[in-house]
Amino acid sequence: MTQNECPGLDLFPDRAPVRKPGPASWLLRGLALEDEAAVLAGLNRILSASPLRNMTTPNGMMSVRTSSCGDFGWVSDQRGYRYAPLDPHSSQPWPEMPEVFYKLAHTAAARAGFGDFVPDSCLINQYAAGSGMGLHQDKNERSFDQPIVSVSLGIPAVFLFGGMKRTDPAVKIPLYHGDVMVWGDEDRLRYHGVMPVQPGHHPILANHRINLTFRKAG
Ligand SMILES: O=C(O)CCC(=O)C(=O)O
């Protein structure tokens, strides 16, 4: 990844521990590595109870595979997106949010100045090479008072962080295993997305990128 691929962020050394891509947005490099083994063990437990699947949206099949944990899971079908307390595959509640997930999300938010973050939903996205996510706003949550905490694991990806309009220019932020992005307050409704992931290999997650997105949904 060259500096030229990150327009707007080339003032920051690429692996600087903290970047601030917006007034209320933070990139905390490697924060999730502190509890890496426990986070990955928690992930495995969740996915054995609620496996990853390709959901459909009103625009077609998603290229990422998803699951969830916590009180609310993010679900989508031809009718649209919403949060639901039950996994539609099993009709059972989503797996409980592991304590280490909650702690990671809470710590990241607190470091970014959001001391009272209480996530009740964690969406798990799995990207294979070629999968990406178009620019979108997170706005299905009941309130926008709480931030979004987004954890990257596995092979790298380029995160697109735009403005309040879909057409606003987006900066490209390379994200690596263990990086955590937090955005809230005036940045809470920024458009964001993920460029199609390039093929790669990670020693634990092989040829995949996993993203954990923590939100207060209900
Ligand atoms: O995978 C990512 O880094 C972002 C995921 C995302 O934007 C979402 O799930 O809404």
Image: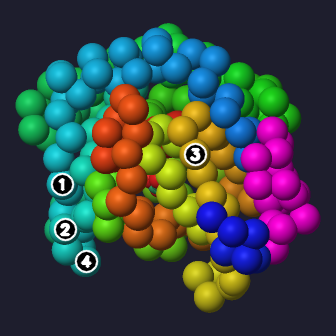
Q: Is residue 23 magenta?
A: yes
Q: The disc labelled 1 sits on which kind of residue? A: Asn
Q: Is residue 16 magenta?
A: yes
**124 vs 140, nearest the viewer:** 124
Q: Which residues are magenta?
A: 8-26
- Name the disc covering residue 54, or none: 1
Q: Which residue is mark 3?
A: 176
Q: CA distance from mark 1 to mark 4?
A: 13 Å
The disc, 1 or 3, on the residue closer to the chain's N-terminal end is: 1
Which element type, helix, strand or loop, lies under badge 3?
A: loop
- Name the disc covering residue 59, or none: 4
Left or right: residue 212 compared with residue 124: right
Q: The disc labelled 3 sits on which kind of residue? A: Tyr
Q: Which residue is mark 2?
A: 61
The disc, 2 or 1, on the residue closer to the chain's N-terminal end is: 1
Across and down, in percent, residue 195 comes to 48, 69
Residue 43 location, quadrant: top left
The disc, 3 or 4, on the residue closer to the chain's N-terminal end is: 4
The disc, 1 or 4, on the residue closer to the chain's N-terminal end is: 1
**Nearest to viewer (mark 1 / mark 4):** 1
